[in-house]
Amino acid sequence: MRKINTRLIEDAVYKAALHAGINLTPSCLNAMESARLSEKNEAAKFALETLIENSKIAVAQNMPVCQDTGMAVVLLEIGQEVFLEGKLLSDAVNDGVRRAYKDGYFRKSVCDPITRRNTGDNTPAAIHTEITAGDKIKLTFMPKGFGSENMSKLYMLKPAQSVQGIIDAIVNTVKSAGSRPCPPVYVGVGIGGTFDTCAFLAKKALTRDVGIHNPDPTVAEIEKTAYRSINNLDIGCQGFHGTITALGVSCETAPTHIAGLPVAVNIQCHCVRCVKEEI
Amino acid sequence: MKKLTLPLAKQQIEELHAGDSVSLTGVILTARDEAHKEIFKHLDNSLPLPFELKNSVIYFAGPCPAKPDKASGSCGPTTSARMESFAPRMLSFGVSAFIGKGEMNEATREALKKFTGVYFAAIGGAGALYGNAIKKCECIAFPELLSEAVYRLEVENFPAVVAYDCRGGSIY
């Protein structure tokens, strides 16, 4: 058994949040650079150049890369040999978020769903915990903007719809989102599970580096086919048309019920921000 | 790139075409979902607004807080489609232009034609770059809405693209 004080988790969340709000992931930057080089549409190319320049300004001046510094999504994979001590885990995570969003001059974008009153400190975070083997904690911090989150969808397909149904669901979600979610998008897809776990799989798929495929070749093929179809939609960066509408498609699967085929499509804008730490 | 000084005269708006790159200098006002609701509450109850809608340029945006050495924090556009239910009426009260990101509906495009307005697309996600184009930022209404309040921004060389012109032309 290893004792970990939740103060360490709070500090890790704090550091991860400050970094994530300012820095795009290296795999996202690579994908944006490739997009800039291959895009032929002039307006879309200009937009891609502007966005790459923006990411450099953000780092140089320590400013949020996008003003939507997101809702804080925190994934904690906790080894079952860990004994947590100190303040409540969720309090530790929220305290880390609260401090980071204040010290980083990040926007506080969380509000009551009915009254719309802002909570004032960007808490609570969306916290997911999983119990894993070992005595370590893996933390993934992903600030999620809502221009793209709003364009996400969950489908309960019929098993007969099969692989083609999955691909159509992915492509149609991006198509109907059009210019609204800040394309080029990164598409996280959950396939299988239940209504709720499917949505979580889609979110988890977005924590994978852009350009890395699922190790299962059948799933990787779905990713590649959907990616090609999306880039034939002619939406382009910002909806200005062109050949780069997606930076990538990432699918995660889980066994499901014999009667169902849940597919969740979680859209991420081109600002892919994700920090992973091990405690 | 066309350099435009705000506010825009009707004649200047008529000379803009969908797809034109522009650079804006002058005063713009931010308003997102909640600010629009407040503005409409005032209009519906004939209450005076603490700012003029006539000839204004409305930016669908909510800034990050400014660091002590900056006029504004990061401040790129938000998704305009969420404001399309308000847009025609805003134009009828004299708003001359919107700045946002992404498509808006047919009713908005018709209203832009009717009232000779223009919709500029800023580059969504370029928050830091747009933050630096803001030289002065002042909250002028609904401060309780925090980042969703109405801010009066003085901008210099704010890059955008004409998304919808006043003849029904569209970049999308």
Image (tube, rainbow, N blue to C red):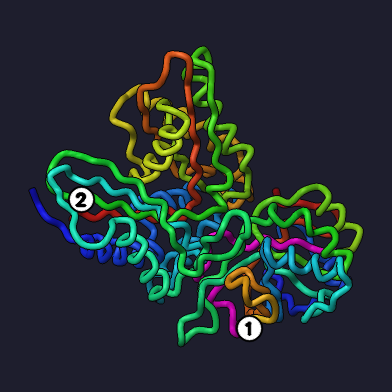
* Magenta span: B117-136
What residue sits right under mark 1 in the picture?
B138
| Residue A222 screen position, x and y as percent | 43, 26
Labelled pair 2, 1 in contact (Cβ < 8 Å): no
Q: Nearer the viewer, mark 2 or mark 1?
A: 2
Looking at the image, how many numbered discs can be counted on the residues? 2
| Residue A39 screen position, x and y as percent | 52, 48
What residue sits right under mark 2 in the picture?
A137
Residue flagged by tag 2: what amino acid is it? Ile
| Residue A57 seen anywhere in this rendered image of the structure | no
Q: Count neighbours of disc 1 (C-alpha within 10 A) and say few if under 14, some if 14 to 19, many if 20 or more.
A: few
| Residue B95 seen anywhere in this rendered image of the structure | yes
Nearest the eye: B162 or B49? B49
Q: Secondary structure at mark 2?
A: strand
Query: Do the residues at pointers 2 and 1 share their chain?
Result: no
In the picture, the quarter occupied by the C terminus of chain A is bottom left
Residue at position x 26%, y 62% from top? A87
| Residue A15 screen position, x and y as percent | 29, 66
Residue flagged by tag 1: what amino acid is it? Glu
Against A264, is B162 above or below? below
Against A3, is A173 above or below? above
Residue at position x 86%, y 56% from top? B111
Residue at position x 19%, y 54% from top? A84
